[in-house]
Image (cartoon, rainbow, N blue to C red):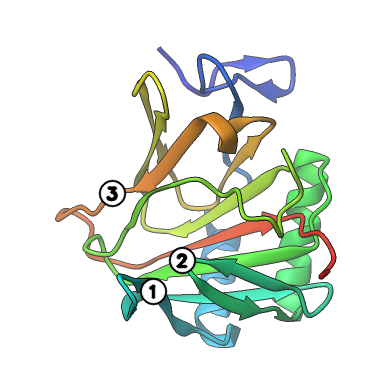
Amino acid sequence: MDLLEQIGNQPRNLLPQDGIVHYYGPVMPQEQADHYFNLLIQDITWQHDQAIHLDKTITTKRQIAFYGDSDFSYTYSRTTRKALPWIPVLVELKSLIEQRSREYYNACLLNLYHDGHEGMAWHSDREQELKRHGTIGSLSLGSARKFNFKHKKSQEKRTQVLEHGSLLEMKGTTQTYWLHCLPPTRVVHTPRINLTFRHMVRNR
């Protein structure tokens, strides 16, 4: 079954129920994707991510950065991050993704995975700082990686390979009913950058 089968100009929903996930495939030429990847490696203020588990602080090999319209606070894994001001390359990419998806975003959480040994465990993005049922636009640059979905009740799964320069959208009730993860792999030896554009609510 072709996951890129289109209905008009809109990608087909990858989920069978309880949510909407659209995969657009690459939304820019390879040369442009390479250009943005190199700019982000150089210009982003990367920091190793941290999480608190069993009252212990764990520092990940994966690196992150958080940018936005305002000094938003965003708490996940019991750790709070504050948004940095937009830089030009992120403003360009935000505009590109907003035009393609016809959505509005005011923040971006970036992840840098140095190789296939680094991934992300099963989770859903339901933090109180995020707009309820808001859209998350996920732009992938660098190595292609598998991205998995699992229904919270039925355990039904879906998988999509995220290509260099590709866009995936999670919207509607997806975060309520589905988990997602980026599984580690031994066959990927080069880095990947993932930009997740989000709609944050104002600090309370």
Residue 179: percent from left, percent from top: 44, 38
Query: Contact, CB < 8 Å: mark 1 with mark 2?
Result: yes
- Taking the spot 46% from the left edge, 66% from the top edge, the residue there is 77
Q: Residue furthest left?
A: 186
Q: Residues within 10 Å of mark 3 (few under 14, many from 20)?
A: some
Secondary structure under badge 1?
A: strand
Q: CA distance from mark 1 to mark 2?
A: 6 Å
Q: Earlier in the sequence, mark 3 or mark 2?
A: 2
Residue 69 left/right relative to 135: right
**Mark 3 or 2: the one toward you:** 2
Q: Residue at x 17, y 53 (%)?
A: 187
> In the rendered image, which residue does mark 3 sit on?
183
Mark 2 sits on what residue?
77
Look at 58% across and 61% down and name the residue there: 195
Mark with earlier residue (1, 3): 1
Provide the secondary structure element on which disc 3 rests: loop
Q: Is residue 127 left or right of residue 147?
A: right
Task: Give the label on residue 52, or none.
Answer: 1
